[in-house]
Image (cartoon, helix red, strand yellow):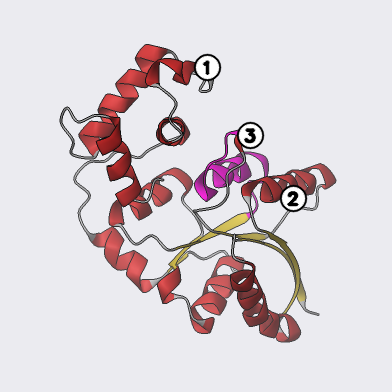
Amino acid sequence: MNKVVKVLMVDDHPLIVEGYKNILQELSSTEYKIIFETANDLKEAYKKVKQSVISEILFDLIFLDINLPEYTEKNLSSGEDLAVYVRKTSPSSKIVFLTMHNENYRLYNLVKNINPEGLLVKSDVGSKDLTNAFQNVISDKIYYSTTVLKLLQKQVTNDFALDQFDRQILYQLSLGIQTKKLPQVIPLSLPAIEKRKRNLKDVFGLDKEGDLILLRRAKQLGFL
């Protein structure tokens, strides 16, 4: 009897989602019965995860992009934020990130904060990589693509990972919100926010540069 696997695929490019589904459908006919649900933005994905928790029919596997249309009502600005929510509410669900980012610091941050069961750079992903990721993760193994493993082997100069508050600070600044007004949208005091901004500049190798340079560097590293 085929094993039933409930999968949520989250990507803002519908054609990519369909491509992934078609690849995995071949497994569905031989080894697994895969039940697919899809989402193209964080709002839709959040609601589907929440509904799965309410119904107690959790997703076995969630394929998740990093750059997704935000869901400001829930302070979700990236796939990483959604993954934090999944870890809290549906801890048995396995997470596989598929990302365009190939910067070692960004990938290190994903591993440090989320510890995903799978992590693949999209430029690596062919049908074999996707099926290998699926089969390994469903079998309780970790699967990182070759490029990810090579990048993570590079030395990271500072053992520091951006948490959800750090990412929210960068995101709100990118919207043009002034630092003094950030406590209105982020549950931190102004001194705490200013301290985090100083830490971010230190981590990114910046000195006394202003917010524009900070945001430019954050974007280069894939945090925006």
Residue underneath mark 1: 184
Taking the spot 31% from the left edge, 20% from the top edge, the residue there is: 195
Farthest front residue in view: 176
Q: What element carries label 2?
A: helix
Q: Does the magenta stretch include residue 150?
A: no
Image quarter for residue 216?
A: top left
The kind of residue on which mark 3 rests is: Lys
The kind of residue on which mark 2 rests is: Lys
Of badges 1 and 2, the one in the foreground is 1
Main secondary structure of the magenta stretch: helix
Judged left or right of residue 180, residue 66 is right
Taking the spot 62% from the left edge, 41% from the top edge, the residue there is: 71
The kind of residue on which mark 1 rests is: Gln
Residue numbers of the magenta segment: 74-93
Image quarter for residue 208?
A: top left
Disc on the earlier residue, 2 or 3: 2
Find residue 48 and name its label: 2
Q: In which quarter of the image is the C terminus?
A: top left
Image quarter for residue 53?
A: top right
Vertical order, 2 against 86 (above or below): below
